[in-house]
Amino acid sequence: MKKIHWIVLIVLCTVVVGAGLYVYLKDDTEDVRRDIITYIDAIRAGDFKTVFDYHAPSQRRRLLIIKRSHDDVEDLLEELYKEQKESFEQAPFTTDLTGEWSEKFIFPRDSDYRIVDIEMVVDTENPSQPLKDIVERINAVVTVGVNYRDKSTAPDINGKVKRATYRIKMIHSENVARTLRGEVEYKRWLFKAISVVDGSIEYW
């Protein structure tokens, strides 16, 4: 009987933990949806201030400046913003989408997009820290379908794309701060990288 009781207890605990995780991830999914829409719409509108605020590499550099600087922090932050804006405006397109700011070519102003799926993924990383400091965190992978109405503004990925599906990696601002042993001023999901889904491209 004791064995049966233990089995029942384990099953109940599993169900409770699973239900709690489901609710937690569902809440995060809604936050991810809100933040990726904010980022994509800012890209399409050319709103670099918002793009900067939701761009993980930029925010990582910003946190590094805040952590390491003192009297000159405001000047350094202003310099970083100008540098990133110039980089954004002058960035060349790379067909493998690994270049920084490749996403600005994927979401031109006259494109249409829809969020197809959001997957929360457990990611264990060891950012050059001792084994005991390994960070286990939740990242998000957003699948987005994009339709290009104008061939002239569509990205050229070995040919002009008419429609395609992409995966976008998002990381939380708290996890960016955590890897730097810092504190975050806000809580939001940040754009990290984009890639095209194999076999999803339809050409003009």
Image (cartoon, rainbow, N blue to C red):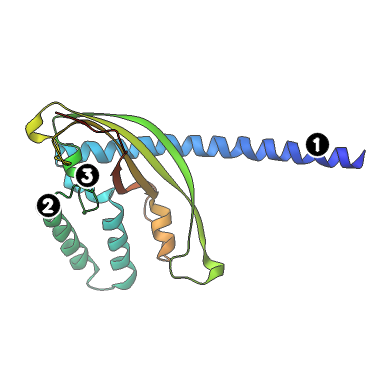
| Residue lying at 21% horizontally and 63% vertically, measured from the top left | 77
Amino acid found under the numbered disc labelled 3: Glu
Q: Residues within 10 Å of mark 3 (few under 14, many from 20)?
A: many
Pointer 1: what residue?
Answer: 8
* Label 3: which secondary element: helix
In percent of the image, x 17 and y 50: which residue is there? Answer: 94
- Which SS class for mark 1? helix
Q: Which residue is mark 2?
A: 92
Please tell me which of labels 2 and 1 falls first in the chain: 1
Residue 197, by quadrant, is top left
Most distant residue in the right direction: 1
Marks 1 and 3: in contact by CB < 8 Å? Answer: no
* Left or right: 124 in relation to 112: right
Q: Quadrant of residue 21?
A: top right
Residue beneath disc 3: 103
In-image side of 93 versus 66 (left or right) = left
For the residue pair 199 and 173, the one nearer the viewer reads as: 199
